[in-house]
Image (tube, rainbow, N blue to C red):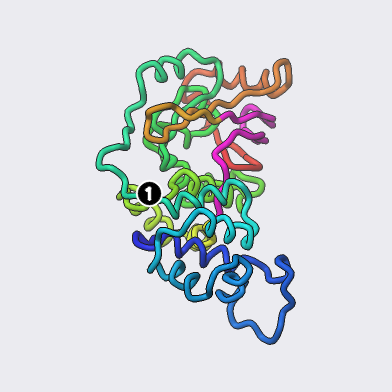
Amino acid sequence: MSRSNVLGEYLRARRELTDPADVGLRAMGVRRTPGLRREEAATLAGISADYYLRLEQGRDRNPSPQVLRALARVFRLDETATEHLLSLGAARPAAPGRRREAVPAGVRQLLDAINLPAFVESRTFEVLAANRRATAVSPNIRPGANRLRAIFLDPEEQALYPDWSQAAKGMVAGFRASVGSDVEDPRIVQLVGELSLASDTFRKLWARHEVAALAGGTLRLRHPRAGLLELRREKLPLSDSGGQILAIYHAEPGSDSARALEALGAEPPHAGPDARAHDSGTA
């Protein structure tokens, strides 16, 4: 991952993924590169081709929000991706030591008391704390494990997803949103470098620069002991925590999934084979 031109890399990736037909351009002649040409992107955004080239090359790293929003419209970015682009244009070096990974004592007490699978993860998707019910849902939800690393480097984890490619895509897009413009963090540099070397799929997904909101959603899990689980996933940001997220899984009260989840949580620790989850989306 480049540590010097993250804005330019993002613009180039999104330009190359924009179909000329989607922005009203007719294909004229043979195109040697995918997506829009730089000149086309500049014209559609109402800026000069020379200025756009400087943006991609990292020779101008402080464009106005108006310019970035114009480019977002050209590249047909949604609200989440537009905000990500704006954050890249306003990026400033991270203050040393501002990332705090200690989970507050009150949150740990909540994890122990809550009668649902729950865990805390860092902005790099490392599990910082988890209750027993969460680990029973998936053994990769345990302190010290990194969920992004697991989904790309653990063959058993990959086999748990009915649509692994979609789950992996969503995980990378969520990681992009979590990381934002802070590419100087050595932990992020190391993790992205490791996965880029070990997984061709990760490398290609990372190069697309897609982002997705870190929000809740629905989950369909095929658990080896609990069976099919239809769950909701809530993601709650913890204030003054350096980007930590509290994740909670729950089911519709009185449903088969709720009863199965309750039975799973009542099992003694380490009972039976490792719990692995089949997820139709990003866990």
- Residue at image mark 1: 182
Residue 76 to residue 270: above or below: below
Mark 1 burial class by Cα count in 10 Å: few <14, some 14-19, many 20+: some
Give the image location of residue 208, x and y in percent: 54, 61
Give the image location of residue 130, x and y in percent: 44, 26
Extent of the magenta region: 210-234
Give the quarter of the image for residue 144: top left
Q: Quadrant of the N terminus?
A: bottom left
Furthest residue toward bottom: 29
96 or 89: nearer the eye? 89
Label 1 element class: loop
Residue at point 70% right, 21% down?
252
Furthest residue toward top: 113
**Helix, strand or loop: magenta stretch:** strand
15 or 208: nearer the eye? 15
Q: Is residue 135 visible?
A: no
Membership of 277 in magenta stretch? no
Q: Is residue 112 visible?
A: yes
Residue at point 48% right, 30% down?
237
Disc tally is 1
Residue at point 48% right, 34% down?
139
Q: On the rendered structure, is 222 left or right of 272?
A: right
The amino acid pointed to by label 1 is Asp
Give the image location of residue 25, x and y in percent: 72, 73
Residue at point 59% right, 43% down?
160
Q: On the rendered structure, is 21 left or right of 226?
A: right
Residue 242 to residue 38: above or below: above
Give the image location of residue 102, x and y in percent: 32, 28
Q: On the rendered structure, is 78 left or right of 144?
A: right
Furthest residue toward left: 96
